Image (tube, rainbow, N blue to C red):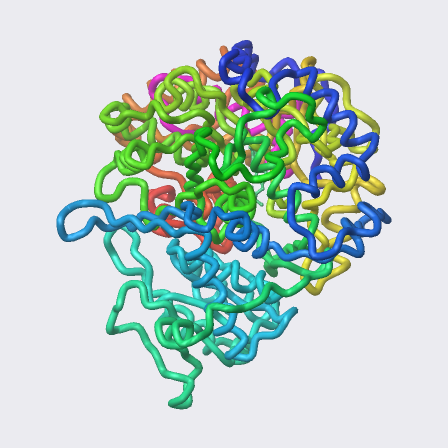
């Protein structure tokens, strides 16, 4: 692995970021964690006494049987809450119904299209309503032959039935494998084969910018592929009622079942399976890597506790029946965020939480469904695109639903910036209290825009660093306790010990770039790559003995804040100096003319590597070969030189109307590297959101 080697120049060329934003005092006063001292004390305790700490956290949730031992650790295989029996679906739904909160809103859903009267189509699902439909769906799965431990593939649009399908699997101990509804037939087939999955839940179609995406037809195509014929049963939720969607009923010799028939003829009584703590919960395939997809495995109890706690702290959540905050409770030695017994009469405000991710990604698993429902916080699901029917759709949703906590990706924020402030200014966003970002480094300019334009200049921003593999937040500001710095993902979550090391595994100095490693086990950690033990060990556990290596470059500053420098393979070594692609991108985006930038290295005769920047300008792309283009290029090169030092001056600048992104919003750097190097593009472009972008980049 090409880790950024220690080099003083690394620090010299770092973008200097001096702005910092402590929690607003009024916010901190009412927060679960309200000072840096409190965070530090709890963080120290969580590492010194993990057994005691996690036992207290876990006590907020329901267990059929308590654990014998909190943690048994033999790297890389932890046993968390060994001996315990629990069920995540039970903790999401039954627990709330049993506490008398069954009628409260659990999932709020908004369709992409407006209704015939021009008004938005909204559904509010209560805990009781969800429990009923989930139990029916779980019984339908059983009727199809699904047993505990079977892998069920889910390929759906963002409809409530997607969350219901996930919860139904968790209820009966089936292992779901959710595939993003924008993926191809080949991607489905690969995952079905790798997971040996004989069951699929899908929709006839989904809506995207008013058009129907033919999900069922894509599933059919996938099942024709080699090996994928193992699928015996497909449950189809008819969302679009598209007559073209292929459907051959099982009874007629096909595989298909209609949700409206099979699910709705089931009983709504389906007791939750008592799962062992380490029973598999789900597999989620990570995208972006070449070769065979990696099926990341998460298990029941640890993931549940981790999703619950990280949601609660990062977003400072207040749920139904929580009652007053700790500040209002005298003589109480529970952990400060613990809601304690349900207070049904409580009139304390409840959050309305919205994460704009898709359930096909880990962010949707942990921060739409599994972290929010056990916190009893209404979680909003939106079906469609951010610019449909107009570019203010998100802000319209925030205003109408009175959203208090909002979580999105930097790439979306940069798009909003580019679309113009007028779409934001039309709406009252004053209900917002915490803003989050995830998925890639956020450049300080976008961070400041997010804070000013969306957060009214007051909302704390949480830049959360984590991965599919980590199950939940690992490094993040905590909105009431830590001072946020634009571009930094803050400090380790409670229970997380993180450090930056040199290639030989020894600790890096302050502000010295190196490899990020996680030193100790945490409850939400991956338990393996499905069916590939060796790859699991090689990928994550071999760089530094006994430590988890996420393959991200990072540095830690003098205040203990972490800065992600991009994947370790994104670091460019230019004439012996390490440059994070992120630093150069941030410098470019700080220029008034630049909306978005992506930077990669390319082989350079003299410097080893040169820097190539792909730039989306505000307004028009300058005409290729024109004097105007040359002048703009020179201006940007000089600007980066001023910001970061001469070593960071890009060797190539290419103006482009768009960047190649995966459907999860990550820039496809290997493709840009090929373009910059003037090579033929041989990398797989099947996961690109818009394959036509490649032609634009190549001037075709
Ligand atoms: C949750 C998610 C993981 C990779 C990760 C890192 C990048 C995620 C980030 C971030 C900088 C952040 N990443 N969050 N980089 N700052 N706040 O995105 O999971 O799809 O598995 O991607 O994304 O490089 O290693 P996943």
Image-based side of 386 in relation to 355, left or right: left
Query: Looking at the picture, how far across and down is residue 590, in whole percent?
Result: 43, 18
Q: Quadrant of ligand 1?
A: top right
Q: Residue furthest left?
A: 117
Q: Is residue 574 magenta?
A: yes
Quick check: can you spot residue 674?
no
Q: Out of 30 and 450, give the one closest to the viewer.
A: 30
Q: Is residue 249 visible?
A: yes
| Relative to 542, 655 lies left or right | left
The answer to whether residue 37 is above or below residue 225 is: above
Say whether residue 471 is magenta: no
Residue placed most toward the observer, 38 or 294:
38
The percent coordinates of residue 514 (x first, y second) are 72, 28
Total numbered labels:
0
| Among the 4 quarters of the image, the one containing residue 119 | top left
Residue 623 horizontal side relative to residue 157, left or right: left
Q: Which residue is at the front of the view, 451 or 82?
A: 82
The residue located at (38%, 83%) in the rendering is 249
Asked if residue 665 is positioned above or below residue 584 in the image, the reply reads: below
Q: Which residues are magenta?
A: 568-597
Residue 563: which quarter of the image? top right
Taking the spot 64% from the left edge, 70% from the top edge, the residue there is: 148
Residue 490 position within the rendered picture, expressed as x and y whole percent measured from the top left = 61, 24
Above or below, 306 against 450 in this view is: below
Q: Quadrant of the N terminus?
A: top right
The picture places residue 99, in percent across and down from the top left corner, at 54, 48
């Amino acid at each position: 692995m090409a880790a950024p080697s220690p080099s003083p120049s690394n620090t010299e060329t770092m973008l200097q970021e001096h702005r910092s934003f402590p929690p607003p005092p009024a916010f901190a006063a009412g927060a679960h964690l309200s000072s840096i001292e409190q965070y530090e004390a709890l963080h120290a305790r969580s590492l010194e006494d993990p057994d005691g700490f996690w036992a207290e956290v876990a006590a907020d949730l329901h267990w059929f049987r308590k654990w014998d031992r909190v943690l048994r650790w033999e790297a890389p295989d932890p046993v968390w809450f060994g001996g315990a029996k629990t069920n995540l679906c039970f903790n999401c739904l039954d627990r709330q119904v049993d506490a008398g909160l069954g009628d409260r809103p659990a999932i709020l859903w908004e369709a992409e299209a407006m209704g015939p009267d021009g008004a938005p189509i909204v559904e509010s699902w209560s805990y009781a309503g969800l429990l009923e439909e989930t139990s029916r769906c779980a019984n339908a799965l059983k009727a199809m032959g699904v047993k505990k431990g079977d892998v069920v593939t889910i390929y759906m649009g963002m409809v409530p039935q997607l969350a219901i399908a996930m919860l139904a699997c968790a209820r009966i101990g089936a292992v779901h494998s959710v595939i993003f509804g924008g993926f191809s037939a080949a991607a489905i087939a690969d995952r079905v084969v790798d997971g040996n999955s004989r069951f699929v839940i899908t929709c006839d179609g989904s809506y995207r910018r008013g058009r129907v995406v033919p999900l069922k037809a894509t599933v059919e195509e996938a099942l024709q592929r080699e090996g994928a014929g193992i699928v015996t049963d497909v449950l189809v939720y008819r969302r679009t009622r598209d007559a073209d969607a292929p459907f051959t009923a099982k009874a007629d010799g096909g595989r298909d079942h209609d949700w409206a028939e099979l699910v709705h003829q089931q009983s709504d009584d389906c007791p939750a399976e008592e799962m062992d703590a380490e029973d598999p919960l789900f597999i989620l395939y990570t995208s972006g890597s070449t070769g065979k997809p990696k099926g990341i495995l998460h298990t029941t109890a640890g993931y549940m506790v981790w999703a619950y706690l990280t949601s609660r702290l990062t977003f400072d959540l207040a749920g139904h029946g929580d009652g007053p905050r700790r500040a209002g409770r005298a003589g109480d030695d529970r952990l400060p965020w613990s809601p304690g017994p349900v207070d049904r009469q409580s009139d304390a405000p409840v959050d309305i939480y919205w994460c704009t991710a898709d359930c096909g990604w880990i962010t949707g698993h942990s921060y739409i469904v599994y972290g929010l429902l056990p916190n009893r916080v209404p979680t909003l699901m939106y079906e469609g695109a951010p610019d449909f029917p107009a570019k203010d759709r998100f802000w319209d949703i925030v205003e109408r639903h009175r959203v208090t906590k909002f979580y999105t990706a930097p790439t979306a924020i940069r798009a909003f910036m580019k679309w113009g402030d007028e779409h934001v200014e039309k709406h009252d966003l004053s209900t917002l209290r915490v803003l989050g970002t995830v998925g890639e480094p956020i450049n300080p300019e976008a961070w400041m825009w997010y804070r000013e334009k969306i957060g009214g200049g007051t909302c704390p921003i949480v830049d959360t660093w984590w991965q599919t593999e980590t199950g939940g937040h690992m490094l993040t500001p905590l909105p009431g306790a830590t001072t946020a710095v634009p571009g930094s993902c803050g400090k380790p979550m409670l229970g997380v010990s993180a450090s930056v090391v040199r290639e030989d595994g020894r600790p890096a100095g302050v502000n010295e770039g190196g490899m990020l490693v996680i030193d100790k086990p945490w409850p939400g950690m991956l338990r393996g790559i499905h069916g590939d033990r060796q790859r699991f060990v090689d990928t994550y556990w071999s760089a530094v003995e006994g430590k988890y290596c996420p393959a991200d470059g990072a540095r830690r500053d003098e205040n203990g804040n972490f800065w992600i420098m991009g994947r370790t393979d994104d670091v460019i070594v230019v004439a012996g100096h390490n440059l994070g692609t992120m630093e150069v991108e941030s410098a470019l985006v700080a220029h008034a003319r630049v909306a978005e930038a992506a930077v990669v290295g390319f082989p350079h005769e003299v410097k080893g590597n040169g820097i190539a920047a792909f730039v989306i300008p505000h307004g028009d792309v300058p005409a290729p070969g024109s004097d105007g283009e040359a002048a703009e290029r020179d201006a940007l090169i000089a600007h980066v030189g001023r910001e970061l030092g001469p070593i960071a001056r890009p060797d190539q600048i290419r103006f482009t109307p768009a960047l190649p992104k995966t459907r999860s919003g990550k820039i496809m750097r290997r493709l840009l590297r090929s373009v910059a190097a003037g090579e033929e593009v041989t990398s797989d472009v099947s996961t690109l959101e818009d394959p036509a972008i490649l032609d634009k980049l190549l001037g075709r």
